[in-house]
Amino acid sequence: MSNKFFSQAVVAVFLALPMSQLFAQGTRVVLWLQNQGEIAGRLLSVRDSALVISTNAAPGNHIGAQTAGIIVVKNQDIQRVFIKGKSRVLISSGLGFLIGAGTGAIIGFAQGDDPPCNDNYGPVGLAGLSCWSFTAKGKAVLGGILGGCAGTIVGGIAGGAASKEDKAIYPSMNHDFSALKPLAQFPKKEPAYLSAVK
């Protein structure tokens, strides 16, 4: 009973949390500048008059390392913003496989052993072919395989629906990029070290 409860709790946690909270790191963007240059990095913050981009893969723990590679780009210097789409198919398929295989194995094992076959079972001449007898472990393996396959398919379909396409954003005449706030690593309030970068 505790295994079934544990598997249901794991499924509930993964369904309750949106993928953006599980993997929130700031969306990867490419800024095309008015002077024909470009800057690629993670979108950290959207200010009223500028975008804050990190060109570092992973900032360190101390303040100097956290601010290294952070660039503040004024909105009027940006010609367009390119947002690289993100495929969720692989991670969703893998998650679906794990959930399906785990659930199938638990259900198969919970059904217990089948009674053994005997010669009196089934029509005459087909006694060995018409009786299927599995142990609890055998059912767990079969349930895990079937559940894993079904979970992979469902996860792949869900991942395809959740995937995002590449998108280019051209600023309006007033250079307003506030629509990008939900994609930033810090959409509401910047941490102190980031606010200090001008």
Image (spheres, grey):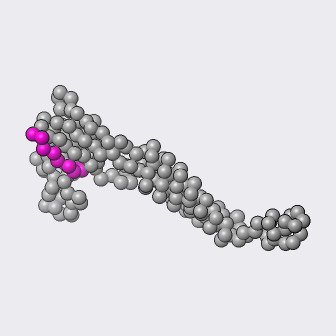
**Residue 115 horizontal/vertical position (percent):** 79, 70
Q: Is residue 115 above or below residue 66?
A: below
| In this picture, residue 46 sits left or right of residue 142 | left
| In this picture, residue 24 sits left or right of residue 53 | right
**Residue farthest toward the top in the current orientation of the protein:** 173
Is residue 178 a member of the stretch shown in magenta? no
The N terminus sits in image quarter: bottom right
* Magenta residue span: 35-44
The residue sitting at 21% across, 51% down in the picture is 41
Q: Is residue 11 visible?
A: no
- Secondary structure predominantly adopted by residues drawn in magenta: strand
Q: Is residue 56 visible?
A: yes
Image quadrant in which you'd find residue 59? bottom left
Q: Is residue 28 above or below residue 74?
A: below
The residue sitting at 29% across, 48% down in the picture is 27
Image quadrant in which you'd find residue 104? bottom right
The residue sitting at 56% across, 57% down in the picture is 149
| In this picture, residue 22 sits left or right of residue 8 | left
| In this picture, residue 33 sits left or right of residue 27 | left
Q: Is residue 160 above or below residue 110?
A: above
Number of marks: 0
**Residue 31 horizontal/vertical position (percent):** 19, 43
The residue sitting at 22% across, 45% down in the picture is 30
Image quadrant in which you'd find residue 142? bottom right
**Residue 155 horizontal/vertical position (percent):** 50, 51
Which one is in front, 105 or 14? 105
Q: Is residue 91 above or below residue 114?
A: above
